[in-house]
Image (spheres, rainbow, N blue to C red):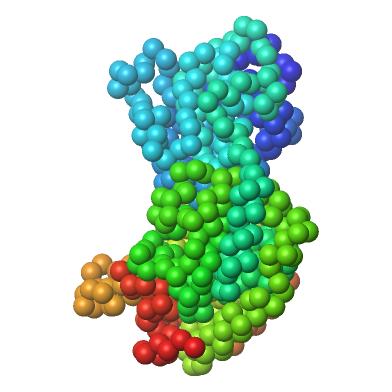
């Protein structure tokens, strides 16, 4: 027993004992009154080097850090907060994880059981507040239930379609002695009533899929975030692409699952996707959706999205099937297992011939030549060029981003490895990048971490620079500083008659170099390309945390762009107003 000084097993002890048995090693959090019994117990577990707690400077930072930790490790991220404002400060981070299907466990302190419902000091119904944005949630009212509930929560968060699970623990439950302590481990002694753990795929369904392959001449793999969440999926998708010679596109969430240099990949599709990806999805006759949800930023005008195609939709969540687009063949199950069954059958060569899709691949290659993602040639400091140079200098780094133009340029110009892309895709949370970099750094401590942020996004969670300094976290933060809320300005220019209502930030911007120095961090300001190239050489040879303020062209727009309500084939900003497809 770890807390030998206390001589008893409490609800708080049961929490950490269960964590240890399930391999939880890192927690991101911020203490407060209602969660103090848990933090008091944590003292002993940290003293014995069994768990490491990372003190953030705002609870939102804890949730984003736990989220990113989960994304880069494929383990569950854990965060702590106290009751009331501490718990509500987690809400944005919980919603971010829910939208991107990230497994996360949230532990919140609550007022004592006798005070619940009395509007006590720092009491809020975090259970009720978060119901729409969690996979499941609990209020523990008996210390004897702690280990069982935590074990169940860890299992639910990571199985099926992953997601955040919240446990609200009243203050006195953490202090209460467990009368007969029984430790629970994984699913061996925990019943899961009414929870479908896994769906099976029949040979009949697989044969139907192969028959659709046989009759297709222009297929396209549409790879979503579910492939990232399904363990060991990148390898089997790579094998599928090679085996069937099928071109592939990815969503923002699916970035990294395939190598952008592969001749069969067409990059990201959708609002700011490549022209050739959007042409491919508009012209394909078979769309194989893998862990994708057909969201509006991908589809554009929904009734014209892949309108010529039959659809195979593979997803672990039955609720996604037919939600936005009706598939001709729905397949419910773990993507990795479904694809493994599909490619392992030797007889599938009878369905698909190697030369079957040659004309289709040639057609896509012509689009690539006509409508490439070009880096504009100018003496001005352009954000696209800066981001491309960063990716060239740090090809094997983990990249976190904030949200806006810099996020889209990063998706366009950075080629990276699976599990090395950490970005708020569904919710689009500004302020995500810096705390996400912290979480990623603790998840994979030996790998370089790059955070690409914007001058507006960075200010939303900049207090986490203190966390970076306290734990000496070696991350490089590049602030793409264009003096605007860049994407807001672009929309105001394009769709709101150039009425720039409250999107210009220059007069309010801090001196980021001085700000970083105030936190004791190394910092630079870049105003020309030659200095930036020299700086990248320096950064490649240092593990010191650095903040780089890159003052780029202020009114550069992110293209291609599909305007709201338009089909994916109707892009602006690709160099040709009249689009003629070959």
Q: Is residue 153 above or below residue 232?
A: above
Determine whether, in the image, residue 426 is placed left or right of residue 388: left
Q: Can I make out residue 449 in this image?
A: no
Question: Where is residue 499 drawn, in percent x and y?
Answer: 21, 75
Camera-side residue: 387 or 367? 367
* Left or right of 160 on screen, residue 1: right
Spot occupied by residue 392 in the image (x, y as percentages of width and height): 66, 77
| Residue found farthest to the top | 179
Q: Residue at x 67, y 47 (%)?
A: 203
Percent from the top left, x then y, of residue 180?
A: 65, 7
Residue drawn at (49%, 93%) of the image: 378
- Is 368 placed above or below 152 here? below
Q: Residue furthest right?
A: 346
The answer to whether residue 170 is visible is yes
Direction from residue 12 to residue 573 in the image, left or right: left
Number of labels in the image equals 0
Q: Quadrant of residue 454?
A: bottom left
The quarter holding residue 436 reads: bottom right
């Amino acid at each position: 027993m770890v807390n030998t000084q206390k001589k008893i097993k409490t609800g708080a002890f049961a929490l950490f004992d269960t964590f240890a048995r399930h391999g939880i090693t890192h927690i991101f959090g911020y203490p407060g009154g209602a969660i103090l019994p848990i933090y008091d117990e944590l003292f002993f577990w940290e003293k014995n080097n069994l768990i490491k707690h990372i003190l953030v400077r705002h609870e939102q930072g804890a949730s984003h850090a736990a989220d990113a930790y989960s994304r880069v490790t494929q383990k569950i991220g854990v965060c702590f907060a106290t009751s009331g404002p501490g718990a509500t400060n987690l809400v944005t981070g919980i919603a971010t994880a829910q939208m991107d299907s990230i497994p996360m466990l949230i532990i919140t302190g609550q007022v004592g059981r006798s005070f619940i419902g009395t509007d006590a000091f720092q009491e809020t119904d975090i259970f009720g507040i978060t119901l729409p944005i969690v996979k499941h949630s609990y209020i523990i009212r008996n210390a004897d239930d702690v280990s069982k509930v935590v074990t169940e929560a860890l299992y639910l968060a990571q199985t099926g379609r992953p997601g955040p699970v919240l446990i609200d623990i009243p203050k006195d439950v953490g202090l209460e002695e467990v009368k007969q302590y029984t430790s629970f481990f994984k699913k061996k002694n925990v019943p899961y009533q009414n929870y479908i753990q896994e769906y099976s795929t029949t040979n009949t369904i697989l044969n139907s899929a192969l028959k659709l392959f046989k009759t297709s001449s222009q297929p396209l793999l549409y790879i979503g975030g579910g492939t990232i969440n399904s363990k060991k999926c990148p390898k089997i998708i790579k094998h599928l692409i090679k085996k069937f010679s099928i071109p592939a596109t990815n969503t923002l969430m699916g970035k990294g699952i395939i190598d952008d240099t592969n001749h069969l990949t067409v990059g990201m599709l959708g609002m700011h996707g490549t022209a050739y990806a959007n042409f491919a999805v508009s012209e394909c006759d078979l769309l194989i959706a893998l862990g994708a949800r057909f969201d509006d930023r991908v589809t554009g005008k929904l009734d014209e999205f892949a309108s010529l195609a039959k659809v195979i939709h593979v997803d672990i969540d039955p609720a996604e099937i037919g939600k936005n687009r009706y598939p001709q063949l729905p397949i419910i199950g773990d993507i990795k297992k479904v694809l493994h069954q599909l490619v392992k059958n030797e007889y599938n060569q009878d369905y698909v011939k190697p030369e079957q899709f040659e004309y289709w691949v040639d057609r896509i290659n012509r689009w690539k030549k006509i409508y490439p993602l070009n880096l504009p040639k100018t003496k001005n400091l352009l954000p696209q060029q800066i981001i491309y140079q960063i990716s060239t200098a740090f090809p094997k780094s983990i990249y976190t981003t904030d949200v806006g133009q810099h996020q889209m340029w990063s998706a366009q110009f950075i080629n990276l490895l699976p599990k090395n892309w950490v970005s708020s895709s569904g919710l689009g949370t500004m302020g995500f990048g810096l705390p996400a970099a912290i979480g990623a750094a603790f998840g994979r401590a030996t790998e370089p971490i790059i955070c690409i942020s914007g001058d507006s996004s960075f200010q939303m969670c900049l207090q986490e620079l203190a966390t970076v300094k306290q734990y000496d976290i070696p991350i490089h933060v590049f602030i793409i500083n264009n003096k605007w809320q860049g994407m807001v300005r672009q929309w105001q220019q394009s769709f709101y008659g150039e009425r720039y209502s409250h999107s210009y930030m220059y007069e309010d911007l801090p001196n980021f170099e001085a700000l970083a120095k105030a936190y004791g961090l190394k910092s630079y300001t870049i105003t020309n390309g030659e200095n930036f190239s020299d700086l990248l050489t320096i950064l490649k040879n240092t593990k010191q945390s650095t903040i780089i303020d890159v003052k780029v062209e202020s009114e550069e727009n992110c293209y291609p762009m599909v305007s709201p309500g338009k089909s994916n084939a109707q892009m602006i900003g690709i160099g040709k107003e009249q689009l003629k497809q070959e």
